[in-house]
Image: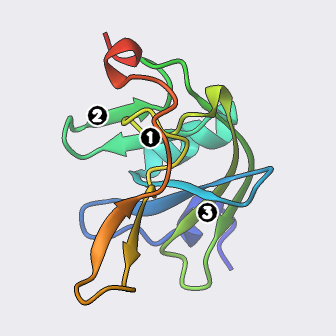
């Protein structure tokens, strides 16, 4: 077994690994993002969630613009070493850029003749007031 904990992490060919953020208190999945080695290393060092923004091609320190940061309480690696699970305390109760608690606010309703997505969670804060 490797002595360096980072050697146990299996990043994809782009140097990324999916990271799931789960609420410490409720167990709810708040979001899924990507991490590279730098993001994971900084997350471990600071105990604040840092991700890799694929669109901006740079480190994304969760909450740096919105103030809704994630305090990391636990970091787990799945059995294949290719998914990270962060147990976080979501500061400000908003993890999603839409102003909701979770990015998973759409539920597929299959009760009718045609499945349809329904919005299940309210907007807690107008995104325009968060990202100005």
Q: Which residue is mark 2?
A: 58
Extreme-front residue of the structure: 112
Mark 1 → mark 2, Cα distance in angstroms: 19 Å
> Residue at position x 54%, y 84% from top?
80
> Residue at position x 41%, y 53% from top?
33
The x, y position of residue 83, in whole percent, is: 51, 70
Relative to residue 119, is residue 116 depicted above or below? below
Q: Residues within 10 Å of mark 3 (few under 14, many from 20)?
A: some
Q: Earlier in the sequence, mark 3 or mark 1?
A: 3
Q: Residues within 10 Å of mark 1 (few under 14, many from 20)?
A: some
Q: Earlier in the sequence, mark 2 or mark 3?
A: 2
Question: Which disc number belongs to residue 96?
Answer: 1
Image quarter where the C terminus lies is: top left
Relative to residue 49, is residue 14 depicted above or below? below
Name the side, left or right, on which 51 lies relative to 3.
Answer: left
The x, y position of residue 103, in whole percent, is: 44, 51
**Dot 2: element:** strand
The x, y position of residue 88, in whole percent, is: 69, 46
- Along the line of sight, the residue nearer the viewer: 32 or 18: 32
Q: Quadrant of residue 104?
A: bottom left
**Dot 3: element:** strand
Mark 2 → mark 3, Cα distance in angstroms: 21 Å
Q: Which residue is mark 3?
A: 85
Mark 3 → mark 1, Cα distance in angstroms: 17 Å
> Residue at position x 58%, y 71% from top?
8
Q: Quadrant of residue 42?
A: top right
Q: Residues within 10 Å of mark 2 (few under 14, many from 20)?
A: few
């Amino acid at each position: 077994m490797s002595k360096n904990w980072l050697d146990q992490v299996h990043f994809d060919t782009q140097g990324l690994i999916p990271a799931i953020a789960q609420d410490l208190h409720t167990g709810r999945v708040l979001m899924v993002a990507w991490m590279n080695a730098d993001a994971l290393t900084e997350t471990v060092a600071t105990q604040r969630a840092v991700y890799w923004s694929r669109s901006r091609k740079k480190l994304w320190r969760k909450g740096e613009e919105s103030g809704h940061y994630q305090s990391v309480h636990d970091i787990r690696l799945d059995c294949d070493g290719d998914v990270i699970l962060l147990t976080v305390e979501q500061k400000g109760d908003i993890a999603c850029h839409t102003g909701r608690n979770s990015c998973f606010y759409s539920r597929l309703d299959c009760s009718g003749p045609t499945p349809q997505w329904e919005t299940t969670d309210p907007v807690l804060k107008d995104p325009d007031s968060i990202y100005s």
